[in-house]
Amino acid sequence: MHLRSLRFFVWPVFAMASCAWGQEVNSCAKLMNFKSSGVEITKATPIAAGTTEPDPFGPGRSAPLPAYCRVEGVINRRTGVGGEEFGIHLALAMPDKWNGDFLMQGGGGGNGMVLPPLGLNAAGDTPALLRGFAVVSTDTGHKSHGGAFDFGFMKDQQAALDFAYLANAQVAALAKQLIEQYYGKPAAYSYFVGCSTGGREGMILSQRYPNSFDGIISGDPAMRTGLSNLAIGEWIPVAFNQIAPKDADGKPIITQAITDADRKLVLDSLLKQCDAKDGVADGLISNPLACDFDPATLTCKEKSTESCLSPEKVAAIKKAVGGPKTPGGIQVYPGFLYDTGLTASVPIRGILVPGPGIFGPPTTAMEVDVEKQALADVQPLVDSMSTNLTTFSGHGRKLIFYHGDSDPWFSPLDTLEYYRGMAAANGGLEAVSKWSQFYLVPGMGHCGGGPGLDQFDFLGAMVNWVEKGTAPHSVIATGKAFPGRSRPLCPYPKHAHYKGTGDTEDANNFECR
């Protein structure tokens, strides 16, 4: 659903302190004296080179950090609903060897925590801080009390507004002032990089604060969470509940709806049908939009065997992957791609591995009222669906989207549908490709993982585009799922295709078609 009207909010302005210390450069501790209405600086400490921060996304990408000044603070501390303390907390890392640029990293889930300001997303093997960026992160105005998906803060109106769109703009404005104060000059270029909730935040910034960042990278955006939750929390479980065996109380045992043998059959058949469409059979479906796999071809002629599926299972799989529709056949949220991650069990379960839900036990319902739920699940303040980006593009800003083909939480086809609509509203795909690109990532789950290549440097590509005017033609991807392999990720509508000669593990032997 597109918002027909969208108010553009003015960037908040924090008055710069006029104290004598304001002219000193590279004095970290003295940033404690920064004064501005509604702003508290709670920490300003030089951090020695060689320290490490735990990688919040798991081991494998940690590295000794450069020397930097770490500033922590809070904007608009207040007491809200239920007597709870709220405020927009932030952490800013300013390296001694600064490259002159600023990067804001997006959040994830319901936010509620200040992650280490490293700039890990879409940065390949070298986080932004190690490249010399000044990096800021924020909890967007509240503290999580129940993990990554704690949305209890939404009962407080201001906290809900801060999370929806206000906090990031305020944090970015303050970070830019602190950067200028510390280094004695403003950042030359500003970037935002985020995935999931961070991807949605990037879209919000491009749509509601079009002059805030020179380059925005939006990955697997959680741009219509109400409708995606309808798909993964009700539509898909109900499809499998309808065919699952029942326990002693008559409730469906959803984990037994699809067996391991069923999943193997589906995956093997999917690869047989679509893997080689990119010129080589390699366990990756690099041209998913051309994949014409249909589970109906696996329907048993008579009784079920290991080489076929019952009509009921076929119907459930097609219904689940096809996405929620009204009884009249109107699609309210896009379906999902037939990709290799459909049967993945870790780190995030694929669609054909039904089990406990993201937010708790799965529903045991046998039906879902899609029309009623779809109306209730639209969230105008949070949803990031505006396509009017004339100010953003008119000032030379750049916007890159990427989305994992096997993302089971947010459909890559929803992001693609937005991109197509945005292109149509801004002069067509050819015109928009001069300032915005969209990349599908084969096999990748939600923001990473899955049977794909989930390490790629969109940040470097974005910097070259913004600062040198060199638009990316492709971005190289690697990953633990296929050691030693590299592939080009290609901007829509192109895909990676094997040239026909050379090592099939080497990206140089593929081209974007």
Image: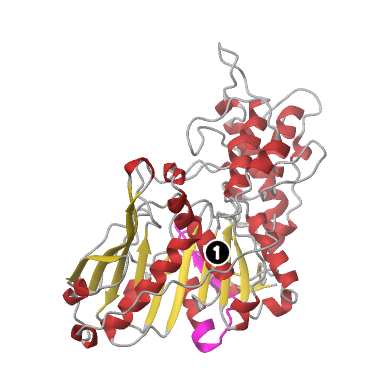
- Residue at 44% across, 78% down: 190
Hey, what amino acid is under mark 1?
Ile
Task: State yes or no: residue 469 in magenta.
Answer: yes
Residue 323: which quarter of the image? top right
> For this rendering, which residue is in front, 304 or 349?
349
Q: From the viewer's perspective, is residue 126 above or below residue 273?
A: below
Q: Main secondary structure of the magenta part?
A: loop
Residue 287: which quarter of the image? bottom right
Farthest residue toward the top?
248
Mark 1, secondary structure of its residue: helix
- The N terminus is located in which quarter? bottom right
Residue at label 1?
Answer: 204
Residue 483: which quarter of the image? bottom left
Q: Position of residue 109 (x, y in %)?
A: 46, 50
Q: From the viewer's perspective, is residue 195 above or below residue 227?
A: below
> For this rendering, which residue is in front, 331 or 503?
331
Q: Residues within 10 Å of mark 1 (few under 14, many from 20)?
A: many
Drawn side of residue 169 relative to residue 421, left or right: left
- Residue at 78% across, 39% down: 297
The magenta span reads 465-486
Q: Position of residue 197 (x, y in %)?
A: 49, 55
Number of numbered discs present?
A: 1
Q: From the viewer's perspective, is residue 221 above or below residue 98?
A: above
Q: Position of residue 3 (x, y in %)?
A: 67, 59
Task: State yes or no: residue 131 in magenta.
Answer: no
The answer to whether residue 503 of the structure is visible from this angle is: no
> For this rendering, which residue is in front, 55 or 228?
228
> For this rendering, which residue is in front, 84 or 305?
84
Q: Position of residue 305 (x, y in %)?
A: 70, 27
- Residue at 74% across, 48% down: 293
- The C terminus is located in which quarter? bottom right
